[in-house]
Amino acid sequence: MPTLNWCDDLALGIAEMDTTHQEFVALLAAVEAADDAALLPAWQALVDHTQVHFDNEDRYMLATRFAATNCHTTHHQMVLDVLRQGLAMGQAGDLAPIRQMTRELATWFPQHADSMDAALAMHLQRVGFDPATGTIANAGALPAEALHGCGGATCTPHDAPEREAAAA
C-alpha cells in the first residue's frame, strides 16, 4: 500500500490542479511500488510529470501577477533540482536516494498542497482565473503589483517594512 493516497483533503477546487495532483500521487505510488529494475523509469516519469506540473502552476502565477521570484516558484525550482539529483544518482547505480526521496515526497506533498498550492488556488478563484483558457474573469481582483511572497495570508510581502513605515 502506498505511503500517500489521494483523498478529498488534498483537493483544492481547481480541476486542473486537482487532476495534476492526483496524477502526481499515482506516479509517486508507482515509484514506491517499483522494483529495482523498474525504479528509474518510474522516477523519470515522476520527474517529467513534476516538471510539467510545476511549469503549469508557475504559468498560472505569472498570468495572475505573481512575481517570477515568489517563494512558490522558487520552491518548485528547488524540488525539481533535488528530483533531478536523485535521477542522476540512480543512473549512476545508487537507487537508495530515490527510495528515500520517495518517502520524503509523500510527507512533503500534502504540506505543499495545503499551504502554497492552497494559497494559489484561493488566489486563482478570487481573480476568476481559468487554467484551461488562461482567461481572468475578475481582472479587478488582480493585485496592483506582482506578488513577491507566496500569496497566502500568512506570507509577508517583500515591501512590508516600507508599508509599515509609510503607515506610521
Image: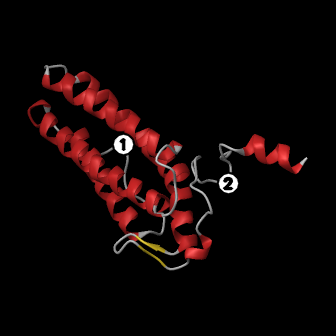
In the rendering, at what x and y percent does residue 77 appear? 38, 38
Instruction: Indicate left or right for 92 with 108 as reference.
Output: left
Q: Secondary structure at mark 2?
A: loop
Colouring scheme applied when the structure was drawn: secondary structure
Name the residue located 13 percent from the left edge and 20 percent from the top edge: 93
57 and 92: which is toward the camera: 57
Residue ID for mark 1:
3
Examine the rendered structure and indicate whether residue 67 appears above or below residue 127. above
In the rendering, at what x and y percent does residue 64 appear? 50, 63
- In the picture, the disc for residue 99 is none
Residue ID for mark 2:
153
Examine the rendered structure and indicate whether residue 162 appears above or below residue 15. above
Distance CA(mark 1)–CA(mark 2): 30 Å
Name the residue located 77 percent from the left edge and 43 percent from the top edge: 162
Local packing at callout 1 (Cα closer than 10 Å; few below 14, some 14-19, many 20+) is some
Question: Which one is closest to the eye, mark 1 or mark 2?
Answer: 2
Specify the amino acid type for callout 2: Ala
Instruction: Indicate left or right for 25 with 33 as reference.
Output: right
